[in-house]
């Protein structure tokens, strides 16, 4: 941690400026953190406390995991959690494989048809096909109520492709030539030279795909029957639209207030992102910008 | 390379061809190709539809509000972060500010409901102080400011990345030279910082203008029920409700195609203007 290095020419800011900046920074941090705190606290609070407090709690006096126990005992949420995890893992892997191979082919000079292919792809960015034709296509392909409908129509993201392609292009040409002289084919070059050098970009692009799959709900509402829904779509129905979740999950005689259960589902839907985020966060600037600025 | 390319051909160009449905009357039994042609009938109906124009107006209105109130926030935040000399503080605030970008719209909307809704934190606090409660979530008049606030909360931090990168590319020596020549902080900002980030600002403005007919489909869809279609209907939700929900596929596809064509033309035009002004633009 390099703290406080002030170049010689830079004058010390006035106390008033410093105070204003500090205030602004604290405000930014609080604006992001307080909502999360309220959700986590409410999910951990006891029913009585939530009711007494009018629906929310900033700091639970007697934390309890009742709400989590209730929803994880089986039923809709557990099933949805499995669907979300499966779609995220399989989707991310498939997307990465397709994006990497395509980006690699498009990044090498002299690949037959690379230029028209790139233009073809960039054009889709300018002119997306539209919701209705996409829906009818999925329908005519017979993918309705099939988990593939959550992955295949969004398999490759143009932005991620451009980022990776830019990153691959930044790898020094000498490395490619050396590998070629050693008799390595395209696959060999990709696997043993390009990929190990592109960890930052792969981490970022992988995270983008994973987050997109994890957060996606709209396609599920379009293409899947409700008993196959992933977590976000369940969340949408029961928390945002306010249908009764407790009845369906825990049966009669539930003692947990809906509010704590709702907030617990919110927490469960957010936690995976909070878990991977800190590990990948440091790559953002490096991975995104080296790729994006070049193109 | 083949699987990726096949994806684009099938799911983008295949679907793009599917836009012919905009010129047809879709009959599920006959499928996409067997359905009868109706020429420009769907478009004619669309242009005579008051609800469609209301959706267009809402879309543009929300886009303009975002341009005025959202657009400057990441820029300001980036300048603030860039001015910090204490790098560990800067990194911490950056990490916190990026985070909401990765939270789904479902969660963001649920969060805002929890904080600003009927029984949310704000109203319970107002109640506790003996004040009138304010209904922000279900109030059509508050909807447009609310959705702009949500966008700011979610993406302002993430939006700083590109400005910070532009700021980082400014040569430190330029600041030093300016300072030695007697330029105060404001003059340095005006003559060194601003010219350095101008291309990025112009680029993002162009992209935003070209994208003016897209204003957060998921965000609006999630909250449309709370305030009603008069306030929350945008072109994308119009397409969704007419087509997917209403089953009027040809008509909805026509509205979607209209949006796509206008959007592409806007990007093209904005880019032309940028070139005229001597900026780099999005593409050459």
Image (cartoon, grey):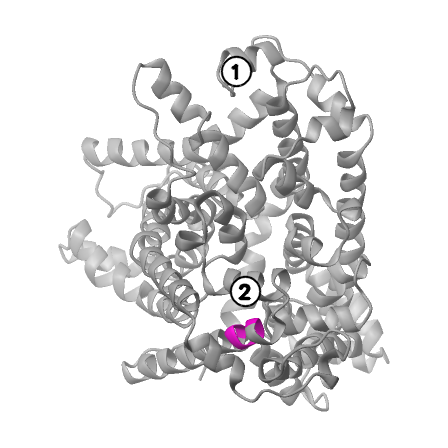
**Numbered disc in front, either 2 or 1:** 1
Expressed as whole percent of the image width and height from the top left, the position of residue A239 reads 60, 35
CA neighbours of label 1 inside 10 A, class few (<14), some (14 to 19), many (20+): some
Compared with A45, A71 (above or below) is below
Residue found 31% across the figure and 54% down from its top: B72
Expressed as whole percent of the image width and height from the top left, the position of residue B213 reads 43, 67
Helix, strand or loop at disc 2? helix
CA neighbours of label 2 inside 10 A, class few (<14), some (14 to 19), many (20+): many
**Where is mark 2, residue-wise?**
A290
Q: Which mark is residue A59?
A: 1
Compared with A39, A134 (above or below) is below
Does residue B205 appear in the picture of this structure?
yes
Residue found 59% across the figure and 87% down from its top: B38
Q: Which badge, 2 or 1, comes first in the chain's sequence?
A: 1
What is the CA distance from the residue labelled 2 to the residue labelled 1? Answer: 42 Å
Does residue B103 appear in the picture of this structure?
no
Expressed as whole percent of the image width and height from the top left, the position of residue A232 reads 66, 44
Helix, strand or loop at disc 1? loop
Indicate the chain on which mark 1 is placed: A
Magenta range is B252-256
Q: Nearer the viewer, residue B106 or A179?
A: B106
Q: Nearer the viewer, residue A207 or A219?
A: A219
Residue found 37% across the figure and 51% down from its top: B74
């Amino acid at each position: 941690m390099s703290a406080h290095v002030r170049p010689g020419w830079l004058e010390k800011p006035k106390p008033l400026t410093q105070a204003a900046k500090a205030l602004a920074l604290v405000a930014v941090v609080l604006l992001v953190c307080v909502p999360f705190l309220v959700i986590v606290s409410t999910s951990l609070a006891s029913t009585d406390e939530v009711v007494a407090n009018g629906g929310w709690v900033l700091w639970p006096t007697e934390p309890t995991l009742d709400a989590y126990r209730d929803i994880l005992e089986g039923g809709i949420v557990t099933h949805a959690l499995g669907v979300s995890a499966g779609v995220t893992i399989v989707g991310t892997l498939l997307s990465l494989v397709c994006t990497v191979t395509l980006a690699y082919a498009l990044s090498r000079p002299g690949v037959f048809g690379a230029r028209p292919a790139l233009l073809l792809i960039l054009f889709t960015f300018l002119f997306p096909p539209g919701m209705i034709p996409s829906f009818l296509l999925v329908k005519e392909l017979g993918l309705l109520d099939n988990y593939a409908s959550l992955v295949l129509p969004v398999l490759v993201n143009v932005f991620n492709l451009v980022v990776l392609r830019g990153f691959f292009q930044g790898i020094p040409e000498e490395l490619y030539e050396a590998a070629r002289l050693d008799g390595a084919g395209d696959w060999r070059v990709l696997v043993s030279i390009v990929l190990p050098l592109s960890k930052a970009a792969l981490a970022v692009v992988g995270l983008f795909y994973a987050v997109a799959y994890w957060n996606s709900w709209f396609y599920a509402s379009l293409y899947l029957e409700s008993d196959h829904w992933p977590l976000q779509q369940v969340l949408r129905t029961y928390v945002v639209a306010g249908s009764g979740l407790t009845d369906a999950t825990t049966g009669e005689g539930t003692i947990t207030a809906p509010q704590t259960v709702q907030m617990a589902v919110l927490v469960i839907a957010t936690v995976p992102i909070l878990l991977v985020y800190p590990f990948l966060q440091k790559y953002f600037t490096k991975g995104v910008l080296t790729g994006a600025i070049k193109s | 390379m083949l699987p990726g390319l096949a994806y684009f051909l099938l799911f983008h160009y295949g679907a793009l061809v599917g836009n012919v449905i905009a010129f047809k009357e879709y009959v599920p039994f006959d499928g996409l190709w067997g359905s009868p042609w109706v020429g420009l009938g769907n478009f004619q109906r669309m242009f005579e539809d008051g609800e469609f124009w209301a959706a267009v107006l809402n879309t543009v209105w929300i886009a303009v509000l975002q341009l005025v109130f959202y657009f400057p926030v990441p820029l300001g935040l980036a300048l603030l972060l860039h001015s910090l000399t204490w790098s560990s503080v800067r990194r911490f605030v950056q990490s916190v500010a990026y985070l909401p970008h990765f939270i789904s719209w479902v969660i963001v909307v649920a969060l805002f409901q929890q904080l600003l809704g009927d029984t949310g934190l704000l109203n319970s606090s107002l109640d506790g102080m003996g004040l009138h409660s304010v209904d922000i979530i279900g109030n059509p008049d508050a909807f447009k400011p609310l959705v702009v606030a949500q966008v700011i909360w979610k993406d302002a931090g993430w939006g700083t990345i590109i400005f910070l990168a532009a700021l980082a590319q400014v040569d430190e020596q330029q600041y030093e030279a300016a300072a030695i020549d007697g330029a105060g902080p404001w003059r340095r900002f005006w003559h060194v910082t601003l010219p350095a980030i101008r291309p990025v600002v112009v680029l993002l403005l162009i992209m935003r203008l070209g994208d003016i007919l897209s204003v957060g489909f998921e965000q609006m869809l999630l909250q449309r029920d709370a305030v009603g279609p008069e306030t929350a209907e945008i072109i994308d939700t119009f397409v969704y409700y007419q087509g997917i929900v209403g089953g009027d596929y040809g008509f909805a596809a026509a509205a979607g195609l209209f949006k796509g064509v206008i959007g592409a033309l806007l990007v093209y035009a904005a880019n032309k203007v940028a070139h005229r002004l001597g900026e780099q633009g999005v593409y050459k």
